[in-house]
Image: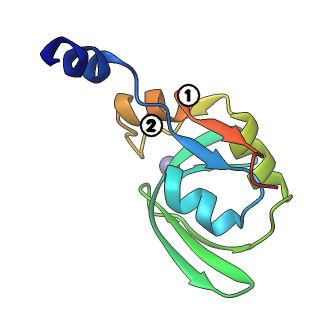
Amino acid sequence: MDQKIKEAKKQKVVRYIFKNQRLFLLINKVKLWPSRSGMLHGVKSIENRSKTMVVTTHCGESFVVWDSKNCRSARWLRNRWYKNPCKKCKIPEWKLMKYSQTVFTDARR
Ligand SMILES: [Zn+2]
């Protein structure tokens, strides 16, 4: 019995995120933002404004994003397309690890 619990704890926790949901929910879960230049920023806060949202990164940038399931940022986020994590944002290693292990699934389509 104890052995079983230990085994379960040893297993990696894989996070599942459903692809076909609002970009807001995606960002809200991963707390990362892929910029157009290929930089991955850490998201400090995100504000929901029905059709748009305001994303603020840890390096102090703030911008309004159209909330769409299939926009560039949603695709880049799901496909993990980025070149470098932002140095100013200081994204912790565990966060990048967690992100790399996240499974984006369309199971609930
Ligand atoms: Zn940044």
Is 37 or 47 nearer to us in this picture? 47
**Residue at point 21%, 22% (across, down):** 5
Q: Earlier in the sequence, mark 2 or mark 1?
A: 2
Which of the labelled discs sits on residue 100, or is there none? 1
Residue ranking furthest to the bottom: 50
Relative to 65, does residue 35 appear above or below in the rendering?
above
Relative to 32, does residue 91 appear above or below in the rendering?
above
Q: Quadrant of residue 91?
A: top left
List the residue tagged with mark 2.
87
Q: Nearer the viewer, mark 2 or mark 1?
A: 1
Is 4 or 49 nearer to us in this picture? 4
- Of the 4 image quadrants, the one containing the N terminus is top left
| Mark 1 residue type | Ser
Circle 1 packing at 10 Å, graded few (<14), some (14-19), many (20+), is few
- Specify how the rendered protein is coloured: rainbow
Q: Position of residue 56 (x, y in %)?
A: 50, 67
| Mark 2 residue type | Lys
Q: Is mark 2 within 8 Å of ligand 1?
A: yes
